[in-house]
Amino acid sequence: MAFTKNVFVNCPFDEDFYPLLRPLLFTIIYLRLKPRIALETSDSGEPRLAKIVKLIADSKYAIHDLSRMEARKVGELYRLNMPFELGVDFGCRHFGSYSQKSKKCLVLENEPYRYKAALSDLSGSDIACHHDKPEQIVVEVRNWLKNTCRLKAPGAAKIWGAFMDFMDRNNRDLSGDGWSPADIAALPVQELIERMEASVKKTRLHPLAS
């Protein structure tokens, strides 16, 4: 896959984050880019870290969501996977090959300035906030990709509308094939990406260029 089209997605994979992950992935696909995410393959023989390092190295762009770093109850350890992968991405950008030095990333959070308490090294960086709202994550990802990749992109409202149309159609199609609501909710990420790509390819009506 082309380095200049790949967008590495670093985010939580729990059920609570899926309402944000779905529109995030759809926005990337709608803008003719390719989301790369650790869940795209399920090879138990490949170490997870090796897989993530390869995805980062192969992606010019990256989106890192740090909104789920905190522990949720007393005695629970906070989650370090997301900031760790952000660090790997920064290292690849600064110490990698000539092309990797052109890498760009977007850091997402739930609330502005909260990250400074846990990751003060990011102070002074531009952090985008989605406030746990699926529509807002479309706005933030669309705006960043549009400006960073120099895309001709429709507005966020149009992308959100296309996403909602896809979700409705996808649910109806899967239900018609005998899928239960629980099955649909648990649709594997790679299969979801494939269905999004097929839908966008079929319904896209406006020209885009990178």
Image (cartoon, helix red, strand yellow):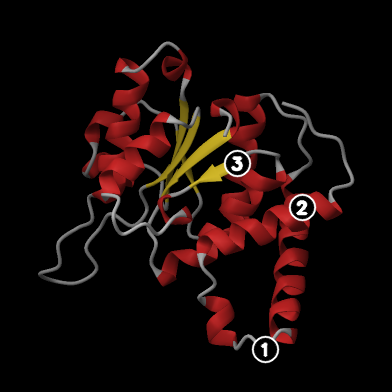
Q: Can you give x and y, in whole percent of width and height, for residue 126 in the image? A: 44, 30
* Residue 136 appears in the picture as rendered: no
Quarter of the figure with residue 76:
bottom left
The amino acid type, in three-letter code, at marker 1 is: Gly
Question: Is 210 placed above or below 127 here?
Answer: above
Q: Residue 85 in the image: state x and y as whole percent.
A: 30, 40
Classify 96 as above or below 4: above
Check disc 3 and give the amino acid type. Lys
First-in-chain label (1 vs 3): 3
75 relative to 174 in the view: left or right: left
Residue located beneath label 3 in the image: 34
Which of the image's four quarters has the C terminus? top right
**What is the quadrant of the N terminus in the image?**
top right
Q: Is residue 56 above or below residue 13?
A: above
How far apart are the alpha carbons under marks 1 and 2? 23 Å
Rendering quarter of residue 5 = top right
**Residue furthest toward the front?**
45
Do callouts 3 and 2 mark residues in contact (Cβ within 8 Å)? no
Residue under pointer 2: 200
Which residue in the protein does label 1 denote?
A: 178
As helix, strand or loop, the secondary structure at mark 3 comes to strand
Which mark sits nearer the N-terminus, 1 or 2? Answer: 1
Position of 22 with respect to 172 (left or right) is left
Picture coordinates of residue 133 (x, y %)?
Answer: 55, 60
